[in-house]
Image (spheres, rainbow, N blue to C red):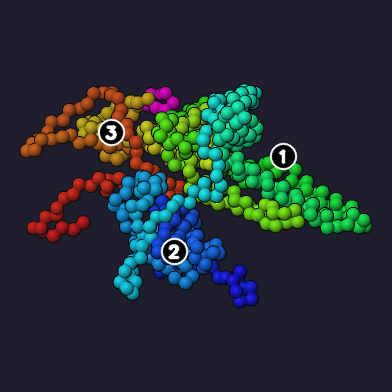
Amino acid sequence: MGGGGGRPTPPTSWPKTENSEISADSEWLVNTEWKGKTAKYLLLKDGFVESPLKECEQEGRCLWAANNNRVLINTPTLKVVKFKIEGLDKVDRKKLENKVESELRKVKLVTEKASKSGKKSQLEFERLATAGDSETVFAGDLYKVLDISEDAEQSSIKSKFRRLSISNHPDKGGDPKVFNEIREAYEVLGDPENRKYYDMGGMQLVKNVENSWKEVDAQKSQLDMQLQKVPKNHPQYSQFKAQIDAQKQQFEKSRMKHEIEKKLRSEDVEVHVPISAYELYNGVGKKSYDFKRIVICRGCRVEPDSPKCQECGRCPPEKIQVPQYGMTPFGRQVVGMKEKEQESLEKCREVTVKINDLRIPKGAKEGSTLKYVSDIGHQTPGKMPGKVVLKVQRGSTNDTYTIAESDLHTVLKISLEQALFGFSLSWTHLGDETVTISRDTATNPDEVFRLKKKGLVGDGGQRGDLFVRVAVSMPSVEKGTSSLTLQAPESTTQAALEREDPVELREGAAWRQWRARGMATNVKASKSSKQEL
């Protein structure tokens, strides 16, 4: 709320003359802070700016955009200030997009307009807004701390903790820091629920879940506070208590556990699985697919140079739960939570996960769901992985057929002799049957043959058709040759098929996109006479 009798402060808006977009090639600026002589600006996702400037205290009052190698900062008093991004020619673009700080320091934001003194202001990279800024979490590998494997039984974790805590106890000359790390590792891995969260989203997820339960406890305390305001001898005390008890039922543990995990779960990942024309024609009972999954490299934050961390890069940004505190009759308590996205300090790598038992029905429709698998989506520090939803992508790069609904299209390449004298060509079709096309008369280029019910299964269980377009290959003739002898080809030969151009459906009819334009040969028009097309 601003001044003037409690009237709300109007939001900052962009002039229609300015492009308020954060372009894809400018995403590396998100969560970076830039400092000048008198101010600094933290560029957040969705175009918001955090700054010590008083006018930027209220969220959404200061904005930013980036496009065309420019950064625009929009504040209520300064309005739109335009900066040119300088130094991009000196950076490693891949490292810049991975937000390597040494590369970010090579870049400067310089104002497009000079001040009255003739000088241009500039902003230099100050820092990355990382999840570690909000709360310090243990960065090592808890499994390594307890010297156990990731598939260790809970009972072995407990026994290993006992042995390590005795041998490393400070009273027996152990290092207090090592002892505390052992104890912290057991607090997480010794609890099956915490261990599950740690495996899914690292130590930040464990903390996020813990903060979420603090919020639940605070909400329950507020309900108890409401009841305490009513004297026990009040005639309606029993009624009030019943109402409070009914409201507290919504905080039942299993229900809240589901709600917390739902809030902390990443979005589902849609994966389109290429299904070949052969698989669509015949159907497949069991198919495997290799899903490229991002996983957290445990311990690589503190040991980035270790051999196991060589293939690890920056993790996706973390969404952390920031507790909002307030004073209550029970003291200072968590009264709410705010989700905030910040750059992760953790390292991630890509691993291949094989997903089995995909059933492909005959003629499966584009975009239809094959299967979904829970908890194997990309790992993000502080979040639970979402589902992977596998969907049909009709056609593969190795197909010689182009798919249009239930019809198939292909190109049959023939020689000039075959086009003139006739031909008989055979090939093995998708159903493992031999298909032969014979012609004893001349064939025109781009002539199309239709083979009924040789396509895919469509609506109603009926098969579509196979369309074969003829492409005539011209013979090579040496320069200066004035005549050519052609002979009739052999009776039957193996057909040479290649994939047809993409096929469009317009108002129920199939259209072939014209590829020849992009392959046209450049020629010079004669100047001796006027030519008309």
- Mark 3 = which residue? 413
Q: Quadrant of the N terminus?
A: bottom right
Nearer-the-camera pick, 441 or 344: 344
Q: Which residues are magenta?
A: 429-435
433 falls in the magenta region: yes
- Distance of label 3 from label 2 (alpha carbons): 69 Å
Under mark 1, the amino acid is Ser
Q: Earlier in the sequence, mark 1 or mark 3?
A: 1
Q: Secondary structure at mark 1?
A: helix
Q: Quadrant of residue 426?
A: top left
Q: Earlier in the sequence, mark 3 or mark 2?
A: 2
Under mark 2, the amino acid is Ala
Q: Quadrant of residue 446?
A: top left
Q: Residues within 10 Å of mark 2 (few under 14, many from 20)?
A: few
Residue 516 x, y percent position in the rendering:
27, 45
Question: Is residue 466 in sight in this rendering?
Answer: no
Q: Secondary structure at mark 2?
A: loop
Residue occupying image coordinates x 65% and y 32%: 191
- Mark 1 = which residue? 254
Of badges 2 and 1, the one in the foreground is 2
Question: Mark 1 near mark 3, Cβ–Cβ under 8 Å?
Answer: no
- Mark 2 = which residue? 39
Residue 284 x, y percent position in the rendering:
50, 27
Of badges 1 and 3, the one in the foreground is 1
Residue 56 x, y percent position in the rendering:
51, 65
From the viewer's perspective, tell me whether residue 342 is left or right of residue 91.
Answer: right
